[in-house]
Amino acid sequence: MITNEPSQFLRAFRQKLFGIFLLRADALFELIDALLLTLDPRSPVELSASPAFRRRFSMVYDALRHGQVEPESAGALLAIAEPADAITVAGYAVYAQDSTIHPRPDAETLPDRGKVYSASKEGTVPGHQYSWLGRVIAQGQSWFAPRDVERIPTSSTPAAVAAEQVKRLALTLAAGALAVIVADSHYAKRMFLAIFVALPNLCVLVRLACNRVLYGPPPPVSRPRRRGRPKVHGVKFRLESPPEPERQSTWSFGKATVRLSAWTQLHFKDLPALVGMVVRVEFLTAAGEWKISRAPSRIPSHASATLSSGLQEAQTAVRRLCIGRKPVEL
């Protein structure tokens, strides 16, 4: 059992960490210590020079090549090591889902190397891509507690890998525990969102591009139909030109004025079972205009909507999560 006292917590965590390695446990454990103590290592073998690694340099690659980790034990360890004071919004534990890249332009023989997008290079580079899922610790910080990491193979997509990670997370949550997964706009796809239909204790908060189209509830059936199935979709909801919001609030957030607009009972055309709420976040000037440099002919993508699952409690979580986000530079 891991205690809350810092030194005992660390000691117990390290003992359990050693237990997740099935093969080459000593070498892998020392590699972790060496990685923590080495500033910006350029290669795995450089870790052998660390005082924490007490083996020959050849054991670095031997451990990485032949070592084995028990995934279930590793996941359970990360679950119990989650900070007790991590952020909770309206009763929901907040988890973030995103992907990151590892550029490998010089490793031409690297297995399954593909083209991955690099924001710093403003284009694709050769390398690997990894999907991360972790618990958000606090507002205004970039630190988070990892719960799952998996390399995205070239035969799959970030959305597909993320969906499996969320399923694994759901299995580790305590009975009755509520959680919300926050993700960027490239996760607003059926491949990722469909899993939340069968996960009643989880909801999703995801950004939407400004050109997305959703649908309202279907019209009520006034009389029995002679043939064909009942309508599944209602009126189109275009984010580029939405109707008057059902709810709207304005308040000061730091130096900015924030206006929140909400529309409920909406769904995607290819996922009618997931009904949620769309929220638009707008940052305004003192004159009440959009805080952007271009002409406001369209809703800016930075202020685009978010979608939550159909749980009633999720609506409160969505509203507060939008409020708690950092100001977006427009």
Image (cartoon, rainbow, N blue to C red):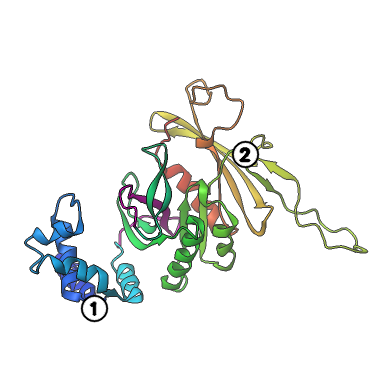
Q: Residue 21: horizontal and vertical position, in percent?
A: 25, 76
**Could you tell me the amino acid type at mark 2?**
Asn
Marks 2 and 1 sit apart, C-alpha to C-alpha, by 51 Å
Image quarter in which the C terminus is found: top left
Taking the image as shown, residue 36 lies to the left or right of residue 297, namely left
User: Compared to 273, does 266 lie above or below?
Assistant: above
Q: Residue 114: horizontal and vertical position, in percent?
A: 42, 53
Q: How many badges with numbers are in the image?
A: 2
Residue drawn at 28 percent across, 67 percent down: 81
Taking the image as shown, residue 52 lies to the left or right of residue 240, namely left
Which range is magenta? 84-109
Marks 2 and 1: which is nearer the front? Answer: 1
Q: Earlier in the sequence, mark 2 or mark 1?
A: 1
Foreground of the two, 315 or 329: 329
276 part of magenta stretch: no
Q: Residue 99: horizontal and vertical position, in percent?
A: 41, 52
Q: Give the class, few, some or many, for how many residues have Cα within 10 Å of label 2's Cα (few <14, many ≥20).
A: some
Foreground of the two, 19 or 114: 114
**Could you tell me the amino acid type at mark 1?**
Leu
Q: Quadrant of residue 249?
A: top right
Taking the image as shown, residue 191 lies to the left or right of residue 119, namely right
Q: Which residue is mark 1?
A: 23
Assign a secondary structure to mark 2: loop
- Whether residue 166 is visible here, answered yes or no, is yes
Q: Which residue is mark 2?
A: 211
User: Compared to 76, does 120 lie above or below?
Assistant: above
Residue drawn at 20 percent across, 76 percent down: 24
Q: Give the class, few, some or many, for how many residues have Cα within 10 Å of label 1's Cα (few <14, many ≥20).
A: some
Q: Residue 166: horizontal and vertical position, in percent?
A: 46, 64
